[in-house]
Image (tube, helix red, strand yellow):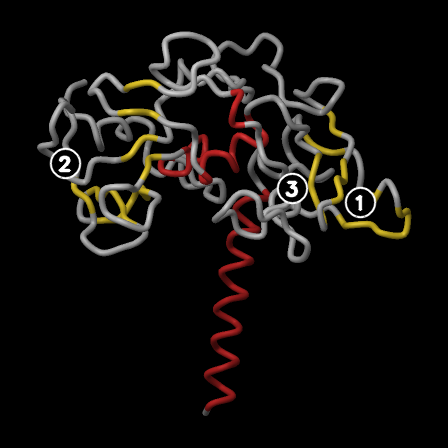
Amino acid sequence: MKKLIVLLLGVAILAIGISAFAGISSTKHNLTTAGFFTTKTTAAIFSNPTNASDTTVITVCSFCHIPHGANITIAGAPLWSRGTPNTAGYSVYGSGSAGGTSGLTLGGTPVGIPGAQSLTCLSCHDGTISVGAIYKNTVLLTAPMTGDVNANGMLVKPSGNTSYNADFTQDLRNDHPIGLVYDFGYPTPQNTAGLSTTISVSGPPFYVTVGGNNVFPIYGGTIGVGTLECASCHDPHTTAQPDFLRDAPTTICQDCHVNK
């Protein structure tokens, strides 16, 4: 019986991994040569520039994760293989002028530097790090990229596309605020009008709940210090909604905002 339980547990874990892999493989986050979209690598392996015999096979997961020798400089990033963005370069929502590092939301909530669950996304999407660059045991390995990238492999705005730009740049003033402490006093917080949300009572992680379901994670281990980050609204592993959203684009704003 014990062996059967262990076997079933192993099968369940494998099924979860296969499910995540299957979901990503059909999205823009599949940057392998088998990817279905424009931006992807033209190589099958990452090569160590100082040791030709040290190579890493390029898989769907390896552009973000690596099983050994991960980058631990972004606290909380799981087996992270990418570099760490230069946080000093960000101009955040409400900062008023380029180069500012702090600002306020319309409700007066301070906005700080993006947290770990935003920096992981921005390590591709702020236009300063090559999409093909990963780290293994602190050594930079770089895969050649093609598609909507510049000569250095960094994301650029697709030619002629005005509806979407994967390169946010480090000027985040025109994007939804991230890196702000989410007031766990909602729906009646001070100085924050127009929000109507419910927070899960157990955590961490804590969630903004929709219809009784935990939908939007708030990152932080203590009530009152959890922050809203990129991954609060986007799940990089899902195909359930467009643009990796955690809820339908027609209703995701109203999930939190009552003043439309």
Which one is nearer the viewer's eye here, 36 or 185?
185
* Residue at figure coordinates x 20%, y 20% from the top left: 107
Q: Nearer the viewer, residue 100 or 198?
A: 100
Q: Which residue is mark 2?
A: 186
The image shows residue 99 at horizontal and vertical percentages of 48, 13
Q: Which residue position holds label 1?
A: 45
- Determine whether, in the image, residue 49 is placed left or right of residue 170: right
Residue 195 occupies which quadrant of the picture? top left
What kind of residue is marked 2?
A: Tyr
Q: Residue at x 63, y 37 (%)?
A: 83
Q: Secondary structure at mark 1?
A: strand
Camera-side residue: 92 or 15? Answer: 92
Q: Amino acid at mark 1?
A: Ile
Locate residue 112, reporting x and y percent. 37, 27
Mark 3, residue position: 63
When the figure is inspected, residue 157 is found, relative to residue 191, above or below; the finding is above
Of the residues shown, which amino acid type is indicated by label 3? Phe
Q: Residue at image x 91%, y 47%?
A: 52
Where residue 232 sits, quadrant-wise, is: top left
Image quadrant containing the C terminus: top left
Image coords of residue 182 (percent x, y): 25, 35
Asked whether the residues under the numbered discs 3 and 2 touch, taking CB atoms below 8 Å apart as contact, a structural biologist would say no
Residue furthest out toward the right: 52
Farthest residue in the bottom direction?
A: 1
Left of 33 or right of it: where is 126?
A: left
* Label 2 secondary element: loop
Q: Which mark is residue 213?
A: none
